[in-house]
Image (cartoon, rainbow, N blue to C red):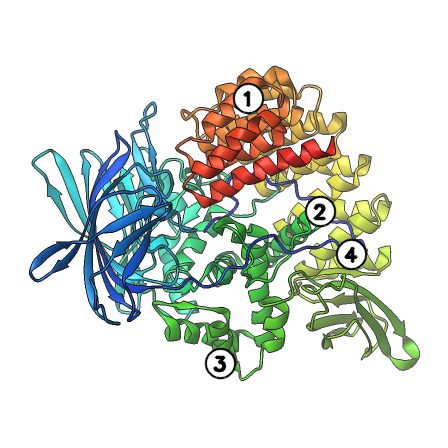
Amino acid sequence: MRCPGLLFLLLLSAPTWARPVPGHHLPEGAEQSVREREVDIGRLEADLHIDLKRQRLSGSITVTLSALRSDLHTVHFDAADPVVSKVELLGRSGAEKLSFDKKSRLLAITLPPGIEPGQELKIRIHYSAQPDSGLYFFAQTGNESAEAWNYGEGGRHYGWLPLYNDTNDRFSVDFRISVAKPYRVLANGTLIETLENPDGSRTFHWVQEQPIPNYLLALDVGEFVAVPLRSATVGARKVPLTVWTHRGDEASAAFSFGATPAMVEFFSSRFGYDYAWDKYDQVTPRNFSSAMETTTMVGFAPYSLSYQGGPQDNGPELNLAFPGWTTEDTIAHELAHHWFGDLLTCRSLASLWLNESFATFAHTVWNGHAHGEDDLTYQRWRYLNHYLDFVRESGVVRPLEYSGFDVSDDMYTTEITYFKGALVLHMLRRILGDANFYPAISMYLNRHQFAEVESRDFQRALEDASGRNLDWFFNDWIRGGGGYPALQVSWLWVPERNAVDLTLEQVQAELPFENLFDLPIEVEIRTAGGSRTHRVRLNKKSLSVALPVDGKPLMVTVDKGNWLVADIHQEETLQELVYKLEHGDLASALRTARQLAQDHARKPAALDALSRVLADGSLHWGLRQEAALDLGSMGGDVAGAALVAGLGDADQRIRRAVVVALGRLGGARGAAALEKAIEQDPSEEVVGAAAVALGTMQAPRADVVLQGLLERDARYYDVFRLAALQGLAELEDKSHVPTFARHIGPAFNQGLRLAAIDGWSRAAPQDPDLAAALKTLARDPDYTIRGAALDALGELHHAGDMEFLSEYAKAASDRNLQKRAREAAKTIREFAGKR
């Protein structure tokens, strides 16, 4: 999974309704077809020595494979960085040398003549590598020991493993990995034995018998300690669970990952397919980015480690009232991949949504199970607005199944592949009902276990379980329908006919990839006699329908429950909106609060209504957060007074939303309140969010307050210094360059380094020392730092950096970094062309 982590997301602003205009576009990218295979790999055996000091590996791999073609003379393996010394064909009579040639990123091995389809071969490859991608080494820094870990998503293993590297092949794994003491090796499957070697090293022998794709291989080397969790009960089986972390982090690991056994049990039951694997381990290596679902040994970033009452962000997103992902979301997400991604794998990245949208859907379902349906409702609302805001800002839309991309990173768009995809699945679940949807999930898993899938496989399972023809849905939302419907809604009560005349109109721009949608819509009408829900079908430009009522409507709600992935604007009076805010369910109230802020921003009744919501501790915390954010956007003394009062709320989630809102509000009163929160609030996440907000509003005393915060230690991920750097970045003051320059080195965590890069780039873009530092960071061991440095170089707009970026794009083994270097150079060229 590649989720937001520490990306510096834009502050979630209340979206403004406007009739959409043409401007949406598909992402640029070449058409990609499913990769053809020459052979079927059955087993990978690796006998490797990893040298952490020299940051290299050496040894051999033995690949058991079967030919798929009768005319096969050469087999090609992906190998960007490995240096191959010898290739052998193993047989009963011994080892026969094979000729080979390595050009660019491919290792071509010449096979003996007469190979027949289905014939099994064993090929041994002797090699060494100092990988630039796929396996990342980190030297000892301060009190942190050396480590290495792999990251294969998107095909990065070509940097260290000469093997076919795509999602449409899977094999069993036998790893014998030797390392010096005191280091430990963690990998997929079961640890068979640990051998003491004469040279003082140890060999760890791991076996993963159930077949997995290349990108799901796990290899972590470091001084890890085990934190056992309780075993999960799955049918008659006990599944062992362990967290591997660093000494001193045991308590945080036990707290943060403590719900995992319950998740294993819940997903096994909910999906109608028991957890399939021998164990479930989780590990928190240094500098790991976000999380990765490597089978049975899942990697998590250090910011996953928190404590009771501490921040629960998956990467501190301190500019947000609530993070896009919590650590609990991420833990559930990676586990869910062991059904969707590991057990069933997308046949190609064009179908990546079958991995990532499903895992995102699953973590939201866990959230609803663990914390209640209202929490899930609020999560769906946040994800909808993340997606809508992304499209408004970028104009980028595409179908969930999409084959037009250049590199793997292009398909990991969080707002589309993760958020929208999960919402589409929830919409489908609502249409079919749980009684059909979840048996279809079980059927889908059982039919395609340990195999590759495409969208049609999922559609067939849904249709077989429900008896429904779902072409219309998949054409709108999966294979087509790149964007979303925008609905304009109006209604009129006609007492003479005891009816509400409802008009629905799709007003999105009609483009070849974004046309009219077929929408089943639930409409709730409440009168003094009670509520009634009607179901209407909008499958054309507009629809007018008369709905029967037994009296004057008190409330009309279109899309009851907020299930549609749509931008809906309903024409209503201020009085109607206030009534709906106070008497509607949570989904209705969330949409109504937003509309009050947009349509009636300065009206006392709207301000008073939202102020009451913020102050009412009996209401759902998500609605109260939204009220705080809306008040911040509305501005004025009434909003300011309500927000300042909210700083005394007992719920730190409300206080965090309040400080974010105060940053939007601005003014001396807001700045003073933020300073007080930084000084006195007991919650680290509230202090951090207040610091970022203080910098964002560029308050007069922001400099001195944030410099002081740099000196404070935090329990969670050095979050005070992180917030201080992010806040100082907002000031764009070149006097802070020494502070930023001091924090870009490897002695600091990844979050601080990213904040320092951002801050320095904004404070002094013409500083020649900055460009030099970014070029050094573009070759940093940390992949995330490399990418950030390349992006920053492009934003400096220095023509003199073009040569470096051009050479980098040619030399880097990672295709994603190649593209980022090219895009940075393109940014510079385009800037020069505008001058």
Nearer-N-terminus badge (4/2): 4
User: Which residue, given by chain and number where applicable, does mark 1 sit on?
Assistant: 770
Specify few, some or many for label 2: CA neighbours under 10 Å numbering under 14, 14-19, or 20 or more.
Answer: many
Distance of mark 2 from mark 3, alpha carbons? 42 Å
Q: Amino acid at mark 4?
A: Pro
**Residue 432 figure quarter:** bottom right
Q: Secondary structure at mark 3?
A: helix
Quick check: 641 above or below 594?
above
Nearer-N-terminus badge (2/3): 3
Quick check: 403 above or below 10?
below
Q: Do tag 4 and tag 2 residues touch (Cβ < 8 Å)?
A: no
Of the pair 615 and 178, the residue shown nearer to us: 178
**Residue 674 figure quarter:** top right
Nearer-N-terminus badge (1/4): 4
Q: Is residue 224 visible?
A: no
Residue 20, numbered circle: 4
Quick check: 10 above or below 341?
above
Give the label, 2 or 3, closer to the camera: 3
Of the pair 173 and 143, the residue shown nearer to us: 173
Specify few, some or many for label 4: CA neighbours under 10 Å numbering under 14, 14-19, or 20 or more.
Answer: some
Give the label, 4 or 2, closer to the camera: 4
Whole-percent x, y for residue 557 in the image = 75, 66
Nearer-N-terminus badge (3/1): 3
Residue 627, numbered circle: 2
